[in-house]
Structures are given as C-alpha cells and as structure tokens.
Amino acid sequence: MKESLMDVLCCPMDKSELELEVDDRADDEEVLAGTLVCTECGERYPIEDGIPNLLPPDMRDDVPA
Amino acid sequence: MDLAERRGVETEVYQPAEDSALLASVAEDEVGSGDRVLEVGTGSGWVAEQVATETGADVVASDLNPHATRQARERGVEAVRADLVAPFRDGAFDVVLFNPPYLPEDAAAARDDWMETALTGGEDGRAVVDPFVESVARVLAPDGYALMLVSSLTGVDEVVELAGECGFSAVAMREESYPFETLSVLKLLPA
C-alpha cells in the first residue's frame, strides 16, 4: 500500500485514526509489511504483501472452506 | 463464456462478466479525473482497473476475500481487505462503486466457498445489498454518489425503496436484458 492510502483509512470499529508501523518497504517506497494501529482502541491490523487487512478481529478468521 | 458458465468454473474469485462490464461502462462515463473512487467487493479488480485507466481517477478497491484483494493488487490496484465501507473515513470518496453478490440463495446449489460468497445475497438476494445501502452515505464526500449494479433477480424496486428510506434518490443509469435477468446500474444520490 502507498502511504497516501492513510488519508482514507480509519479503524473499522470506532472510526478513529490509525497509526502506521512499517516493517518492510518496496523500492518505490510502497509499504509491503507492517501494522496499522488504532490510536483510540489500540486494535492492531496487519499489512501483508502490501495489502492491509482491516477486517474487525472477529471477522479475520471467518474463512469459507 | 457467458455469465452462467463463468459462475461455474472459478472457485475463489469472481471474474469479470457482463455485470462487471456494465458497471465499468457507466462508471467510465460518470467518474471525473480528479475523483477519489472506492470499489467495494472488487473481486478480480477488473472494474477498478478499468475505471482508473479510462478516467485517471484515484481508485481504491476493497474485498472481504483475500484471494480477491491479491488479484486486484496484481492488476496494480490499491487493495484493502474490508467489510463493505467499515474501515474508510467519513466523506473520503466522491464515488463508491459496487457490483454486489445479488443472486437469491439456492439451498441445493450452496457451495460454502468464496465463490458462493461472491455470488449469493442470502434468501432474497439482498443480504449484502441492504447493509451497503445503509452504510455507504457515511463515506461519501459532499456531492458524492454510489453506482451499484442490481439484477431483476434481486428486486430493483425493493432496493430503490430501501435507498429512499436511507435518504437517497435512486436513478437507473443503464439497463441490459439477458435471458434470465435484467441488469441495471443505479446511481444513489444523497437527497
């Protein structure tokens, strides 16, 4: 994800701002791995392979067979 | 390959079909180059990619399905795994696009895989359409609007009525008839 995506994202539960923690970047500065942390409730949302997973925690593992 | 055949082959991500093409063609006419656009339930990411390429707009795509967000990203579309519009800021988008799972559930054909999630909208076909219509206004900018594909199988009148209850005026932008359904693109404008 590009860092500019932060302008449109919020915590899916309380709609508060998120803080970006970067673990890995691509050559073009895109964030490949990291975490988005809610500044209000503290919930942590993973970024993997450049894709942030902003499902609320109770939906994260709800995968069809 | 027609719509029905496509629904039978792929098991993880819905691939572009007639409904996708109809939504993309209306969006290409409506979206401006400076618009910020969200496509909810992007699937393969094809509509989002078309709109970004044809209009120059800034397009973000979301889906519940991790296989879909991966395919969208491979097309060069900015992808987010999300439940409808839940993780997007108030007033963030000029246009929200949605080609929802809209087929009424057929118990005999229940598959319990990602493709079923992509296709079926519960008993009446509106299990995902309804929460979308009820939640999308929050993320629309002033003068923003949603473009949503609806099938006659889902009940266009019922969707228009719900949109009215949620404070939208709904306008049918384009219609296309197929042997078993008529597809429409509705423009939902906050009244």
Image (tube, coloured by chain):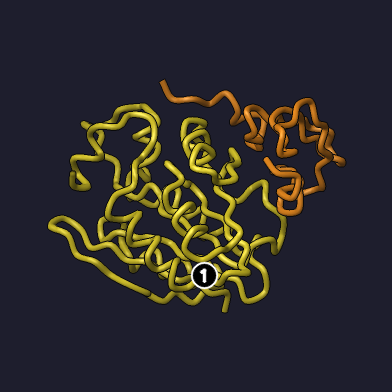
Chain colours: A orange, B yellow
> Which image quadrant is residue A52 in?
top right
Q: Is residue A57 left or right of residue A22?
A: left
- The residue sitting at 38% across, 30% down in the picture is B12
Q: Residue B66, position in %: x, y?
A: 52, 31
What secondary structure is marked by label 1?
A: loop
Q: Is residue B118 left or right of residue B146?
A: left
Give amino acid for label 1: Val
> Which image quadrant is residue B157 in?
bottom left
> Which image quadrant is residue B108 in?
top left
Q: Which quadrant of the rendered structure holds the N terminus of chain B? A: top left
Label 1 Cα neighbours within 10 Å, binned few <14 / some 14-19 / many ≥20: some
Residue lying furthest top: A65
Q: Residue A53, position in %: x, y?
A: 64, 34
- The residue sitting at 61% across, 59% down in the picture is B58
* Residue B97 seen in the figure: yes
Q: Residue B148, position in %: x, y?
A: 43, 62
Q: Identify the subunit bearing mark 1.
A: B
Up the image or down, B13 lies above or below B98; here it is above
- The residue sitting at 35% across, 54% down in the picture is B20
Up the image or down, B58 lies above or below B14; here it is below
* Residue B135 seen in the figure: no
- The residue sitting at 46% across, 65% down in the picture is B147
* Residue bearing mark 1: B31
Up the image or down, A16 lies above or below B70; here it is below
Q: How many dots with numbers?
A: 1
| Closest to the observer, A34 or B164 | A34
Q: Which quadrant of the rendered structure holds the C terminus of chain B? A: bottom right
Residue lying furthest front: A27
Q: Residue A60, position in %: x, y?
A: 60, 28
| Closest to the observer, B3 or A56 | B3
